[in-house]
Image (spheres, rainbow, N blue to C red):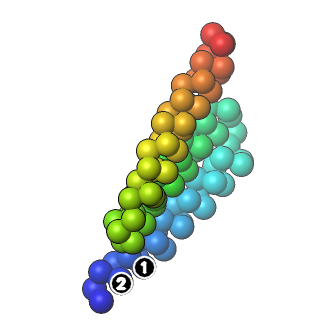
Amino acid sequence: MSEMIELIYFAIFYILCCFIAIYRLIKGPTAPDRAVAGDGVDVMTDMALVLVAMYSGRGIYLDIAIVTAILGFLSQVLIGKYLEGTL
């Protein structure tokens, strides 16, 4: 029972962090701010997928988390190159 309460606390904290990052993604004053917020949302999504995999005992969520982490890294590299002007 204690583990379920901790999971609920984490879910509430996670949702608040996601709303803050999504707000920065939409309202960010500059493109680099938006890029960092997008990376933050990607990392939080990967973390949530790993926790869901641990809680449910299903490994498919880990595979999905690995794929989204790789795609998130590649997208951040491409966005950085574009903002730098070398793409």
Q: Which residue is mark 2?
A: 5
Q: Position of residue 67 (x, y in %)?
A: 49, 42
Residue at coordinates 67% horizontally, 43% vertically from top-left? Answer: 28
Q: Residue at x 66, y 47 (%)?
A: 25
Q: SS class of the residue under badge 1?
A: helix
Instruction: Pick whichever, 9 or 32, lies toward us.
Output: 9
Question: Is 79 on the left or on the right of 12, as rendered?
Answer: right
**Pointers 1 and 2 in contact (CB under 8 A)?**
yes
Quadrant for the N terminus in the image: bottom left
Residue 66 picture quarter: top left
Q: Amino acid at mark 1?
A: Ile
Q: Residue at x 38, y 76 (%)?
A: 7
Query: How far across and down, in percent of the image, does residue 48 sit?
Result: 45, 60
Residue at image coords 59%, 43%: 38
Furthest residue toward left: 2
Residue at image mark 1:
8
Asked if 62 appears above or below 1 in the picture, the reply is: above
Mark 1 and mark 2: Cα distance apart in space: 5 Å
Q: Nearer the viewer, residue 42 or 70?
A: 70
